[in-house]
Image (spheres, rainbow, N blue to C red):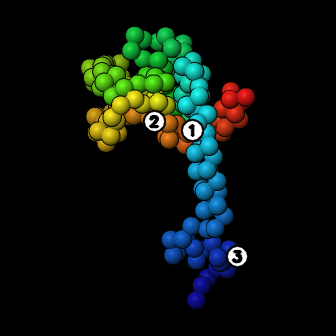
Amino acid sequence: GAICEVKEKDYLIDRINGRTPPAVSAAQTSLTGLANNLAPLIKSLNEYDFEVLIDLIFRQGGFYRSGKLGGTEKDIDLDLINPVSGEKVAVQVKSAASKKVFDTYQNIFSDMAGGYSRFVFATHSPTGKWAEAIENTEGNTELWLVDKIAEQAARLRLAGWLIDKAI
């Protein structure tokens, strides 16, 4: 016997059985579709607008720049800090980049001090062979390619900004 009444029985049964409710599945599918549709818009951005997009993604995620856009340090485009957690993130943004360029920055990041908890290398148009880089990023370096960037843009309500840039 239960000591309480469950008003949302279908929801409870779905949770107990590990099923995703249909409304959640539909929303997830729509979000994935939006991200897929944003990817070509992201690839069409010029260098400056692409850097602004990456900055907007981090800002929507609660970070702020501790320096000006594109000019904080020699090898960093964005020097970011999360005021709640204190996490520091260094970001390098390249519209198009080869695996060799990524490897160079990964080495720079591994030698860099400054209290950074992670380094992000973002590119929407990788050139050449990248399979190894995607699978084998080292240490605290993250590689953001167009799919991850599009997913973040969709989740963080930046679709309107991207559409406006494309018009």
Farthest residue, direction front: 128
Q: If you read the primary sequence from the N terminus, does the residue marked by circle 3 or circle 1 appear first?
A: 3
Q: CA distance from mark 2 to mark 1?
A: 10 Å
**Can you identify the residue that label 3 sits on?**
7
Q: Position of residue 92 (x, y in %)?
A: 43, 22
Q: Position of residue 114 (x, y in %)?
A: 35, 18
Farthest residue, direction bottom: 1
Three-letter code, disc 1:
Ala
Instruction: Tell me the SS state at disc 2.
Output: loop
Pick the front one: 4 or 21:
21
Q: Quadrant of the C terminus?
A: top right
Three-letter code, disc 2:
Leu
Q: Position of residue 56 (x, y in %)?
A: 59, 28
Q: Quadrant of residue 143?
A: top left
Q: If you read the primary sequence from the N terminus, does the residue marked by circle 3 or circle 2 appear first?
A: 3
Q: CA distance from mark 3 to mark 1?
A: 41 Å
Task: Say if residue 86 shows up in the picture.
Answer: no
**Can you identify the residue that label 1 sits on?**
39
The residue depicted at 34 percent of the width and 35 percent of the height is: 130
Three-letter code, disc 3:
Lys
**Can you identify the residue that label 2 sits on?**
145
Instruction: State whether residue 100 is above or below residue 159.
Output: above
**Neighbour class for label 2 at 10 Å: few (<14), some, many (≥20)?**
some
Instruction: State whether residue 156 is above or below residue 166.
Output: below
Mark nearest the camera among 3 and 2 is 2
Mark nearest the camera among 3 and 1 is 1
- Whether tag 2 and tag 1 are in contact, CB under 8 A, the answer is no
**Neighbour class for label 1 at 10 Å: few (<14), some, many (≥20)?**
many
